[in-house]
Image (cartoon, helix red, strand yellow):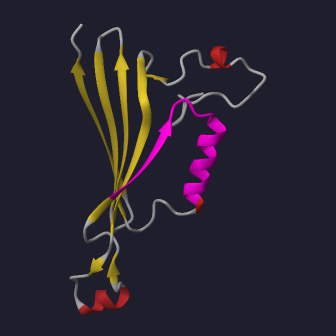
């Protein structure tokens, strides 16, 4: 199955983990994750709104304004799938992504031995006051000496 954490090990103890996932941490067929996937939430501390008095009465604080601070969470590819899923549920229960979140960056550093190349893959999700979000993908590749 392919989803956000398809690189993780299958939780079924009756299955041979090397049969269900012969290369733990392998993504995009030939890229090996280096270490972990990083989820970086950029959140604002909140600031007084600079809107008119009518809007200030409705919204006394602007949640997504002010200084942005990072909050990192790492998902290591060698962890069991059920551990990762439980941590995701815990973050959801604690509202890790809240109305102060401006951006969420999901970053993966991988290595492709066939091409002697490192790739930094980034997915940025931008959250807006109006309630919508936009995602932006980015890849940066660099070749290692062979």
Is residue 28 depicted above or below 90 in this figure?
A: above
- Residue 118, image x, y percentages: 29, 22
Number of numbered labels in the structure image: 0
Horizontal side of residue 98 vs 135, given as left or right: right
Horizontal side of residue 143 vs 13, given as left or right: left
Q: Which residues are magenta?
A: 70-92
Is residue 120 depicted above or below 55 in this figure?
A: above
Would residue 44 be counted in the magenta stretch? no
Q: Nearer the viewer, residue 18 or 145?
A: 145
- Residue 15, image x, y percentages: 74, 20
- Residue 25, image x, y percentages: 50, 25
- Residue that extends furthest to the right in the rendered view of this protein: 14
- Residue 71, image x, y percentages: 39, 56
Quadrant housing the C terminus: top left
Q: Nearer the viewer, residue 45 or 121?
A: 45
Is residue 85 depicted above or below 91 in this figure?
A: above
Would residue 79 be counted in the magenta stretch? yes
At 60% from the left edge and 27% from the top edge, which residue is drawn?
1
């Amino acid at each position: 199955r392919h989803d956000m954490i398809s690189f993780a090990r299958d939780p079924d103890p009756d299955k041979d983990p090397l049969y269900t996932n012969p290369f733990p941490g392998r993504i995009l067929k030939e890229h090996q994750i280096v270490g972990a996937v990083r989820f970086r939430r950029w959140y604002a501390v909140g600031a007084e709104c600079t809107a008119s008095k009518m809007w200030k009465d409705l919204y006394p604080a602007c949640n997504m304004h002010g200084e942005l601070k990072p909050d990192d969470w790492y998902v290591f590819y060698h962890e069991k799938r059920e551990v990762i899923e439980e941590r995701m549920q815990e973050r959801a229960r604690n509202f890790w992504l809240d109305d102060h979140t401006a951006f969420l960056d999901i970053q993966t550093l991988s290595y492709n031995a066939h091409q002697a190349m490192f790739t930094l893959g980034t997915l940025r999700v931008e959250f807006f006051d109006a309630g919508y979000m936009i995602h932006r993908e980015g890849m940066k590749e660099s070749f290692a000496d062979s």
